[in-house]
Image (cartoon, grey):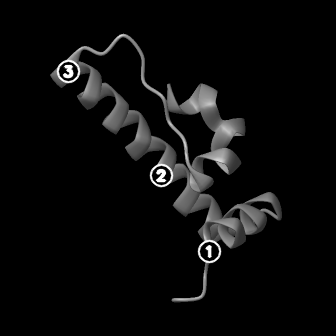
């Protein structure tokens, strides 16, 4: 488990792996909730998500926001 990277999870998701699909779908839901909470608390003009994990998640942006 310690050797699994986000790249591995996204690659497995692309291959229709059931566990990776659950992990990605949960992450999308949680990131959406985090965005909503952040907006509710701080009322920012914009939110910028970045980093290595998010670069692979760009294809899910419509599900996150």
Residue contact at pointers 3 and 2, CB within 8 angstroms: no
**What residue occupies the far top of the structure in this picture?**
45
In which image quadrant can residue 62 be found? Answer: top right
Point out the frontmost of discs 1 and 2: 1
| 16 lies left or right of 2 | right
Q: Which residue is mark 3?
A: 42
Residue at 32% in and 38% down: 34
C-alpha separation, residue under disc 3 versus residue under disc 2? 22 Å
Residue pictured at 61% horizontal, 55% vertical: 52
Among numbered discs 3 and 1, the one appearing first in the sequence:
1
Q: Secondary structure at mark 3?
A: helix
SS at mark 1 in the image = loop
Query: What is the tally of numbered marks visible in this picture?
Result: 3
Q: Residue at x 62, y 74 (%)?
A: 5
Residue at the spot x=83%, y=65% of the render?
15
Foreground: 58 or 20? 58
- The answer to which image quadrant residue 3 occupies is bottom right
Q: Which residue is mark 1?
A: 5
- Please tell me which of labels 3 and 2 falls first in the chain: 2
Return the x and y of residue 25 as percentages of the image width and height: 54, 50
Coordinates of residue 64 in the picture (x, y in percent): 52, 32
User: Who is closer to the viewer here, 25 or 51?
Assistant: 51
Q: Which residue is mark 2?
A: 27
């Amino acid at each position: 488990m310690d050797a699994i990277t986000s790249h591995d999870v996204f690659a497995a998701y692309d291959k229709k792996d059931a566990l990776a699909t659950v992990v990605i779908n949960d992450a999308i839901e949680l990131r959406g909730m985090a965005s909503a909470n952040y907006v509710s608390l701080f009322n920012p003009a914009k939110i910028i998500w970045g980093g290595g994990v998010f670069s692979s998640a760009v294809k899910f942006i419509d599900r996150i926001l």
